[in-house]
Image (tube, rainbow, N blue to C red):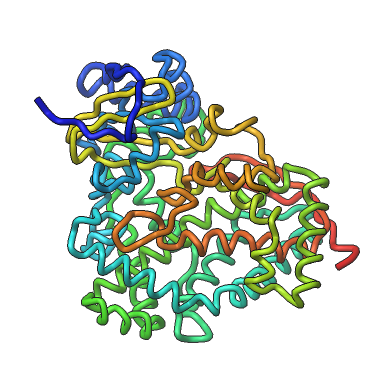
Amino acid sequence: MSSFSSSSPSSDLPVKPIPGDYGFPFFGAIKDRLDYFYNQGQDEFFHSRIAKHNSTVFKTNMPPGPFMASNPRVIAVLDAVSFPVLFDTSKVEKRNVLDGTFFPSVKFTGGHRVCAYLDPSEPNHTALKSYFLSVLAKKHDNLVPLFRTCLSELFVKIEDEMANKKEAPFNTLSDQMSFNFFTRLFSDKKTVDSTIGPKMFDKWLFFQLAPLMTLGLPKFVNFLEDFVLHTFPLPSFLVKSDYNKLYKAFYSFSSSILDEAERFGINREEACHNLVFLAGFNAYGGSKTLFPALIKWVGLAGEKLHRQLADEIRTVVKAEGGVTLSALDQMVLTKSVVYEALRIEPPVPFQYGKAKVDMVVQSHDAAFEIKKGDMIFGYQPFATKDPRVFDSPEEFVGQRFVGDQGKKLLKYVYWSNGRETDDPTAENKQCPGKKLVVLLSRVMLVEFFLRYDTFTVEAGRLPLGSSVTFKSLTKATSI
């Protein structure tokens, strides 16, 4: 008989069989895929199964399924208590699970399995993660000034759009800003190769992530879309030319960063492919969902919150004599608003891990035996909107993380593949740019409310993340 390790030191919760099933081989996975993308939609897919099984832990299939994923069967963990098992790399393996039950071809990354696909037990992981953390630490002093410059350029473009068209599409303008920022951040040169641009990254990302998305097309083309996007991998050769241009550009303008790789025993070519992935997939790709979500939720929160943010930001900046790290640290409400945006709409909603050992995983109400080799899946928006942890979990509450009680809730903010109270190390899988993401989000709010009093937005959905359009923008009347 196997010995089980527990996800908690002790518990009197009853051990129950994991509810749910996978249906008939092949056909069950197809049915779940159609429900997930078309018949029910993402959130209802999970809501309906939680209600059916009266459990936040259950068996299901996850897309893409046949013929792309050899095994679509997962055990879903959808509450704040069970979800963190996915952070424990002594219990779950993170090898090739970044995108879930399928693994995109290494041809998308120059023939290399980049760091994001490595388990911490693999020799290259520690070297590459240490390298990333070192690079980001050395860029620390330049982060805020460079990002403020990029934001100034962004706001000029938004104002031009508002003046000409009475509205401004935030996503495309934000994508260009993010591309400019991350390429300049990793560049030794003042100007970046003009032959590369965000559309190259967009195309490269789409070809890798297409199995996880739907384009929101009319129902009569659902079958065709499902066949094209979710049945067979899109061929990498269609983006090879763009990827090679990006690789050559980074190889050229990131010389000092690539020199640093040798200190960690990483050859220059492998380091550059990992740097392109870090900049294009992790950083730029993450910002495509991060910044629109932040602006969407703050915009929809209304004028009262805007006034409170403007008052705090302008008061602190005036007292500190500028936008400094010390000033940012004193902005309690601004911090809370960023955490709340990351809680309610995390930029990466999915987490996967394959059980390394037999274990017992607990939800609020029961314990479940998970066997070695089982794939565990977490849908983060359900874990971070757990009604047993958060009051009014579906509402955006800007002050949620203010004060002592608010700080206690930070350990349930999981967007970074770890708790907000933990930090990334070379030995874990927490996002190496965790602190960077929080910092940039705060700076975006600070720069915004130094310039504007209030604004309104129209929000919608995209294949990945939210779409945001500015409908009105009121310039600051007092600073």
Q: Is residue 66 visible?
A: no
Closer to the camera, 108 or 399?
399
Question: For residue 238, what is the image quadrant?
Answer: bottom left
The quarter of the image holding the C terminus is bottom right
Q: Is residue 376 above or below residue 291?
A: above
| Residue 429 pos. (x, y %) | 33, 54
Q: From the viewer's perspective, is 195 left or right of 241?
A: right
The quarter of the image holding the N terminus is top left
The residue positioned 34% from the left and 34% from the top of the image is: 8
Closer to the camera, 206 or 222?
206
The residue positioned 27% from the left and 54% from the top of the image is: 117
Q: How many marks?
A: 0
The residue positioned 32% from the left and 65% from the top of the image is: 129
Q: Residue furthest left?
A: 1
Question: For residue 358, what is the image quadrant?
Answer: top left
Q: From the viewer's perspective, is 416 left or right of 168?
A: left
Closer to the camera, 214 or 304?
304
| Residue 52 pos. (x, y %) | 42, 13
The residue positioned 52% from the left and 83% from the top of the image is: 191
Closer to the camera, 282 or 196?
282
Q: Is residue 58 visible?
A: yes
Q: From the viewer's perspective, is 413 left or right of 250?
A: right
